[in-house]
Image (spheres, grey):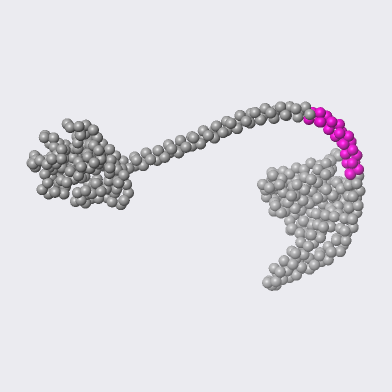
Amino acid sequence: MSETTERPPSLKEAESVIQGLASVFFETNSKPFNYDGETTQDDHRPRPDIEARYRTLIEQVPAVVFMIFLDQGISEAYVSPYIEAALGFSQAEWLDDPIRWYRQIHPDDKERWNLEAAQMVLSGEPLRSVYRIIARDGHTVWFHCDVKMVRTEEGRPWFVHGIAFDITELKQAEEALLHAHDELEFRIQERTIELAKANSELQSEITERKRVQEDLLRAGRELEIRVQERTAELAIANEILKGEMIERKRLEKSILEISEREKGRIAQDLHDGLGQHLTGVAFLSKVLERKLIEKSAPDACDAAKIARLVNEAINQTRELARGLLPVQSGSKGLMSALQHLASEVEELFDITCHFKVDEDVLIRDSDLATHLYRIAQEAVTNAIKHGHSRRIDIGLSHRRDKFLLSIQDDGLGFTERLENKEGMGIRTMNYRANMIGASLEIQKNPGGGTVVI
């Protein structure tokens, strides 16, 4: 073997070897080419029986299998059918163009292919490498090629056979893995920088915290002295505040007494004046509605609407009057007010509403009586509005030194809002109960509805 085969060929030498190999496919009368660049007489030794021995097996292999005779031209070349699945070219198309395979090599890989193919021819060593081939539709396919050149007994190149495996998916996976690796490295570097920065900040924070702790200890001692001084000041201020609170309660009581007198006067005017007129109009509207209904007149709905609006006006007037003075003066004022409330509910809402009292419950404190009435009124309103009750029982009794007020209905019971005590009415009842030193309980009625005690 000459020195040329013992070292890798230069690019110029490789191109010379490849050109010599390629010349066989363009010269019909060309002579076989040997690795020394000399032509020889045709060698007519019998060729391997490819068709008979290997075709069935080769066509089942998911790879491109090929064979090229270097002394007979392209007519003796072979490529397996997988070429079409891999690159989109049929067997005939691939074999009809002698240099299609070379043109389809990716431009960036051609120089390397020249060098490695020349090395195979000169050294006789198998070619094992990876190349990119351009498919018919222009996309790139990666192949892992195993190629071996078989020589004659005299040492001349006879034929080349090999197999190319499509490793495009593997390459894509490698690229994705490499990208992920690079990204991970980048993230690790970023994280390392962040951790170094965080560690530096932590050290600074520890130093700062020690300084702050010392400042806190010093401030704590100063604060203790100031607390003692402030405690003495607050004790003096507390005594002054107690006196002011007593005076304020006295003033509030006086204001409430004056307010109640004015409320009583305004309530009487509303009740005797506007209330009576609206009641008469409501009555006439009801009568008119019934007459129109009996006559099946289309205006009956309008009459009903008028009656409803007048009743709403009456209710608003009564609410204003009762809001100003809901309970008349006298020890039986609360009982009378609750009885009137029950009658009014039956009349306005067409439901059953009873007031029950076993014996006279006398309450001389008008403020206490007013708050109890308001609690009952709000409970009844909730039973009608939210519970859609058809029966409401209002009870008042006296047990020892306590008064017991209860409102029981047969409605739908609690809503989620009422159970959570979020409604305005519930808060109002609780506020009034606290004002008179009472307790308020809202329970589910075992038979249905709600009980307010």
In this view, the residue in front, 101 or 114, is 114
Asked if the stretch drawn in magenta spans residue 232, the answer is yes
Q: Identify the residue at horizontal 74%, vertical 49% (top origin).
A: 424
Q: Identify the residue at horizontal 69%, vertical 45% (top origin).
A: 419
Say if 351 sits above or below 102 in the image.
below
x and y percent of residue 210 in the render?
Answer: 67, 27
- Work out which quarter of the rendered image holds the N terminus and state it: top left
The image quadrant of residue 61 is top left
x and y percent of residue 301 in the render?
Answer: 69, 68
* In this rendering, position of residue 147 left or right of residue 188: left
Q: Identify the residue at horizontal 69%, vertical 30% (top origin).
A: 212
In this view, the residue in front, 191 or 436, is 191
The reply to whether residue 78 is visible in this rendering is: no
Q: Which contiguous range is marked in magenta?
A: 223-249
Asked if the stretch drawn in magenta spans residue 100, the answer is no
* In this rendering, position of residue 249 left or right of residue 311: right
Magenta stretch, overall SS = helix
x and y percent of residue 317 in the render?
Answer: 81, 60
In this view, the residue in front, 181 or 169, is 181
